[in-house]
Image (cartoon, rainbow, N blue to C red):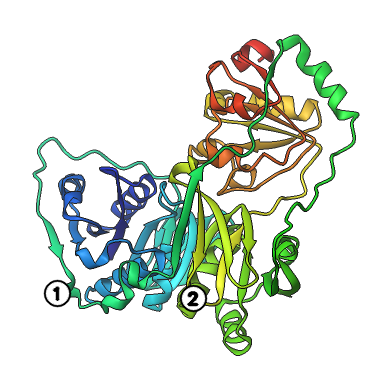
Amino acid sequence: MKILVCVKVIKGDINPFDESALECAFSLSDDVTVISMGPESTKDALLPLTRLGAKVHLISDSVFAGSDTLATSYILSSYINTLDYDLILCGRQSVDGDTAQVGPMLSDKLGINLITNAMKVEVSDSNVSCITRLGEEMVDLPALVTVERGYILRFPSLFSKAGNVEVFDNDYIECDTSKCGLAGSPTRVIQTFENETGKRKCKFITKTELIPLINELKSKSKEKEENTYSGQKLHSVWAIGDEVAHKASEIAENVIVIKEKSPDEICMRALAEKPQVILWNADLWGRKTAPVVASKLDTGLCADCTHLECNGDTLFMFRPAQGGNIYAKIKCLTTPQMATVRTKVNSSDIIVSGGKGVADIMDSVSDFAKKIRAELGASRGLVDMNKAPYEHQIGLTGKTVSPKIYIAIGISGAVHHTSAIEGSDTIIAINPNKDARIFEYADYGIVANWEDIYDI
């Protein structure tokens, strides 16, 4: 079984999702080849992987610099087409971009089957079967599978020796340079600014005030969500699925709702009708299907947008970037202009979410949620630790919620989480660190360990 693993180096470290994919590959085969794209300086981070027994290939050329996900998938596919393989594994996404687009786009460029969000992978001579976030899936080989952070990368043997990182430039790969780098990238970041949205003034309370406060807030009516967009509108927008139609109606005079169908069916209709903009819901299906369609249509795709604007012709898409510390304003130079959009789910009046700070006592958080008749949620960190199911994940790569009361327990308050809860009427944060970021986005805070509040 010949397995290729696509790996990204981020600030000198291997992307953790790609580490998981690599360990998955080692558990399945002794014939593993790592493929990475980046500057030659990334060789230092890739070299230790040779001690694990992997062959390591680095694709590096100045003409590749600045490539977005579409250009990256084209370059990778051009190189992979020179290799023999049975299976390609990628991490679900990179932690710097969080787009989850390269894997699906690459599968389309190569014309092979695709499975995303795999937690467990098994292979036979002719197929690959996976347990994914959506259930069990099996497809014929060759195939590409994107892997969750369920595998822990092994350490090299003390007696293992480093091999060589082979470097291949475009003289070898022979990519069309018009499809590489900035020239081949249809998405453009046109402005960035500090992410200050969602901040609140936190009032700190004692643990004895928690339950009376919850009971008081329960009796209040849910605040109505208002459409605050007042800019120019596009003539028409496609909304793939009913969930994103509301967001489309904010920026379009006419919304055409398209049922969720196969990528080929959506592409055929798009080529015939030539929509100006296509919006997708940023759920698991949308994050898998939209990149494939973008690849087939050779157009740009902006992931996990939280806000949209337009000038009557061009769509401007806003999303957190660089780990959420900034917001990026992005446009697409090609048509159809496409984006996956965060939409709020119909949530309970109360949501209680646990984070890594309560990973070992999550049962008590669940018990508390049941007692106050609340829905249970979780941070991405907790889900990545396999301490909570993905359907509980709240955040930019999970679901966006807007309950009457949101209670965050042991959650530090990373931007990808706070961006998904800012629609809540009231946010209550419980964390032993008084400087935790979550308190900047909460209405009420308790500085304490959860064990000191709840009788475990």
The quadrant in which the C terminus is found is top right
Distance CA(mark 1)–CA(mark 2): 28 Å
Q: Residue at x 50, y 73 (%)?
A: 294
For the residue labelled by badge 2, is the local secondary structure a helix, a strand or a loop? loop
Q: Residue at x 61, y 39 (%)?
A: 197
State the mark number for residue 171. 1
Quadrant hosting residue 83:
bottom left
Q: Residue at x 18, y 72 (%)?
A: 170
Instruction: Answer above or below: position of 391 versus 117.
Output: above
Q: Position of residue 335 (x, y in %)?
A: 53, 77
State the mark number for residue 392. none
Mark positioned earlier in the residue sequence (1 or 2) = 1
For the residue labelled by badge 1, is the local secondary structure a helix, a strand or a loop? helix
Circle 1 residues within 10 Å: few <14, some 14–19, many ≥20: few
Q: Position of residue 252 (x, y in %)?
A: 72, 69
| 1 or 2: mark nearer the eye | 2
Instruction: Answer above or below: position of 127 versus 428.
Output: below
Q: Position of residue 290 (x, y in %)?
A: 55, 68
State the mark number for residue 334. 2
Q: Let me know if residue 267 appears in the view.
A: yes
Seen in the image, is 429 located left or right of residue 230? left
Q: Residue at x 45, y 50 (%)?
A: 148
| Number of numbered markers | 2
Circle 2 residues within 10 Å: few <14, some 14–19, many ≥20: some
Seen in the image, is 79 located left or right of residue 219? left
Task: Name which residue type carries label 2.
Answer: Thr
Seen in the image, is 414 located left or right of residue 258? left
Task: Name which residue type carries label 1.
Answer: Asp
Q: Position of residue 161 (x, y in %)?
A: 8, 44
Q: Let me know if residue 125 appears in the view.
A: no
The quadrant in which the N terminus is found is bottom left
